[in-house]
Image: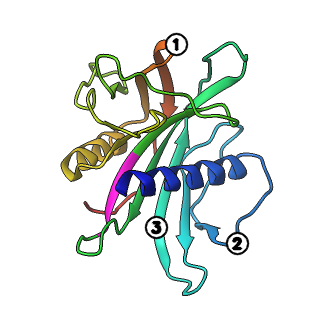
């Protein structure tokens, strides 16, 4: 159930970020927060909240960012970007709200599958530091299109690394493409939700 909720949230946030980066559609159940920003044609951190259309209560909060580079992944010639989503919400009835970090690669029409060969995760370089392998083995959705971190300690560690950095590179293993590196301008994350 948690994976289904995560995937649904990722698809919602992906749609919202695409809309904020150039499309003009809007969703009556979604409001862009006042601090949502866009710089040039590349997305910086975009902030969203989802409201229950019956009660108007905020049910989840999102921060989404896209890579500054794109890659041609398969023979269709479309360029794909990676995006990172932080999502804060109540995941179970007896649990307190927490953040889940998700990663996906898309060209706007389809999501690309991560390879589960050898590991399901990513390698990271924050600013000019050494390669960080703490996330080389994380969870993956059943359809292989989403990597996610839901362990509270690993989420906190990832968010802290992002907050301390200006730039990052993430290398993932994609089906039919192998190791692929995406670059991000991650400076300025405004995320104060404790895990």
For label 1, the residue is: 177
At 46% from the left and 73% from the top, the residue drawn is 59
Task: State left or right for residue 79 relative to residue 129.
Answer: right
Q: Is residue 173 above or below residue 1?
A: above
Q: Position of residue 73 (x, y in %)?
A: 60, 17
Q: Which mark is residue 60?
A: 3
Task: State yes or no: discs 2 and 1 in contact (Cβ < 8 Å).
Answer: no
At 26% from the left and 71% from the top, the residue drawn is 96
> Which of 91/153 is in front?
91
Task: State left or right for residue 191 relative to residue 13.
Answer: left
Q: Residues within 10 Å of mark 1 (few under 14, many from 20)?
A: some
Residue 157 drawn in magenta: no
Q: Position of residue 58 (x, y in %)?
A: 49, 76
At 50% from the left and 27% from the top, the residue drawn is 113
- Magenta part of the chain: 97-101
> Which of 135/113 is in front?
113
Residue 98 drawn in magenta: yes
User: Residue 93 appears in which quarter of the rendering?
Assistant: bottom left
């Amino acid at each position: 159930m948690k994976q289904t909720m995560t995937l649904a949230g990722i698809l919602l946030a992906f749609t919202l970020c695409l809309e904020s980066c150039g499309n003009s559609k809007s969703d009556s159940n979604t409001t862009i927060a006042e601090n949502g920003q866009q710089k040039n044609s590349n997305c910086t951190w975009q902030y969203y909240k989802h409201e229950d259309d019956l009660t108007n209560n905020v049910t989840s909060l999102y921060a989404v960012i896209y890579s500054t580079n794109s890659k041609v992944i398969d023979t269709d010639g479309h360029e794909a970007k990676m995006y990172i989503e932080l999502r804060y919400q109540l995941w179970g009835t007896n649990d307190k709200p927490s953040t889940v970090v998700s990663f996906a690669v898309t060209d706007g029409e389809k999501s690309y599958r991560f390879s589960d060969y050898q590991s399901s995760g990513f390698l990271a370089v924050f600013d000019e530091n050494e390669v960080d392998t703490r996330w080389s083995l994380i969870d993956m959705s059943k359809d292989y299109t989403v990597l996610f971190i839901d362990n509270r300690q690993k989420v906190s560690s990832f968010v802290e690394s992002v907050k301390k950095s200006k730039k990052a590179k993430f290398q993932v293993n994609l089906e039919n493409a192998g190791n692929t590196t995406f670059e991000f301008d991650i400076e300025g994350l405004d995320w104060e939700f404790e895990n």
